[in-house]
Amino acid sequence: MLAGRRILLIIGGGIAGYKSLDLIRKLKEQGASVVPVLTRGGEEFVTPLSAAALAGHKVYRDLFDLTDEAEMGHIELSRSADLIVVAPATADLMAKMASGLANDLASTLLLATDKRVLVAPAMNVRMWQHPATQRNVALLGDDGVLFVGPDSGSMACGEFGPGRMAEPLAIVAAVEAALANGPMRGRRVLVTSGPTHEPIDPVRYIANRSSGAQGAAIASALVALGAEVVFVTGPAEAPMPLGVELVRIETAQQMANAVAAALPVDAAVFAAAVADWRVASASGSKIKKQAGGALPVLEFAENPDILATVAQMQSGRPRLVVGFAAETDDVIANATAKRKRKQCDWILANDVNPATGIMGGSENAVTLISQDGADSWPRMGKDAVAAKLAAKIAEALK
Ligand code: CTP
């Protein structure tokens, strides 16, 4: 809930601006008051009237609007909020922020504020990936600016990749986390989740029954405690958690690359059900049935063990590395051996016998195995397991 919280919402010039109107509504539904600021570019996509009508508040547009200065100066405007949200944040606006320019109302407010700033970038994929933008993102991160998104997907410009503004609900969750003052504030955590898909040919793949529900719940629980979460997920059935940096992958190799790119982190939770093997030479074209009934033979290659790789890093290892052990037999003995072998700090062991209904179900019964021994938790909802784990992680990182 955001009751009584004041959000200064800067709407930059991008097609994603239409989602910012929805964002105003969703913030207000949570009890926040929203003061909109439109950049010149923002006004091309969102009319001041619609922003004002939804916010129920005057819209600020121009630095040299003397009426505004008489009513409330730009310094006061930038400080009267609890949080400044920039959505959509264009490449241009982020470049101004990173270099400290103050040549219009939005950039001046951002430079003058003493409050936290949450940025929801939205731009073409190449603009997002450009070294100049990535440099600015890194600089802003160092300055303590918070980010939500961008998401990956198909874009208004017809291209595909990262650059889409995070969904309004995800931005609301990030706002709640930014204002939550939780024990994980300032901590960056990686969570892997879901199954991986290993292609056989362009239309077939090998997968497993993981729904991604436990990983998503863990990410949400960490966000709720104020953590910045990078969520690397395979093609999962469970709804995506809100307020995370979302990285979608398909194969184990892609997951390994995404995990490497997400480091450094304070803690890493490996909840993904990674395929141990991939098809050694997946066919580039669809494998056809052979005349005479000859069967195709698939040869496998071993995938990288992502958890073990991170747990055994010589430098830059996360302070806390948590794995899962999905077992069908001798659960605790196997999981204890797995923790030693992979050298992670904790393993959450669970019994994935079909009879337990855990894989794909809404409940989980886990045993936390650490160097101190095994601690069996009662069977409970996956959300409750996630909340208990997130609280333990917060405790361990204190
Ligand atoms: N894991 C990983 N990369 C892999 C395989 C597994 O990061 N290539 C991680 C999982 O996310 C999980 C842990 O390792 O946290 C254990 O996964 P599990 O499948 O139980 O273990 P395996 O190493 O595959 O061992 P086995 O299949 O022999 O039980």
Image (cartoon, rainbow, N blue to C red):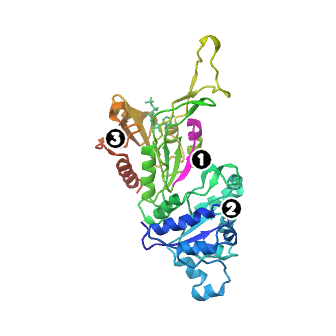
Q: Which residue is mark 2?
A: 91
Amino acid at circle 1: Ala
Q: Is residue 179 above or below residue 396?
A: below
Q: Specify which label sits upstream in the sequence, 2 or 3.
A: 2
Q: Position of residue 287 (x, y in %)?
A: 64, 23
**Quick check: 334 left or right of 316?**
left
Quarter of the view holding residue 134: bottom right
Q: Nearer the viewer, residue 20 or 344?
A: 20
* Highlighted magenta segment, given as a residue range: 244-256
User: What residue appears at the point 60 percent right and 18 percent down from the top-left corner?
Assistant: 296
Instruction: Say whether marks 2 and 1 touch (CB < 8 Å).
Output: no
Residue at image position (52%, 35%) is 305
Name above or below for residue 337 compared with residue 126. Answer: above
Residue kind at label 2, given as amino acid type: Ala
SS of the residue under disc 2 = helix
Q: Taking the image as drawn, is residue 321 in sight? A: no
Secondary structure beneath label 3: strand
Single out the residue that lies furthest toward the left.
378
How many residues crowd mark 2 within 10 Å: few (<14), some (14–19), many (20+)? many
Considering the image in quadrants, where does the C terminus appear?
bottom left
Mark 2, mark 1: which one is toward the viewer? 2
The span from disc 2 to disc 1 (Cα, nearest Å) is 21 Å
Look at the image and say whether residue 237 sits in the magenta stretch: no
Q: Is residue 14 left or right of residue 224?
A: right
Report the residue marked by disc 1: 261
Q: Residue 23, percent across and down?
A: 54, 64
Residue visible at 51% across and 46% down? 317
Q: Amino acid at mark 3?
A: Val
- Between residue 269 and residue 244, name the one nearer to us: 244
Question: Up-down: is 196 above or below 222?
Answer: above
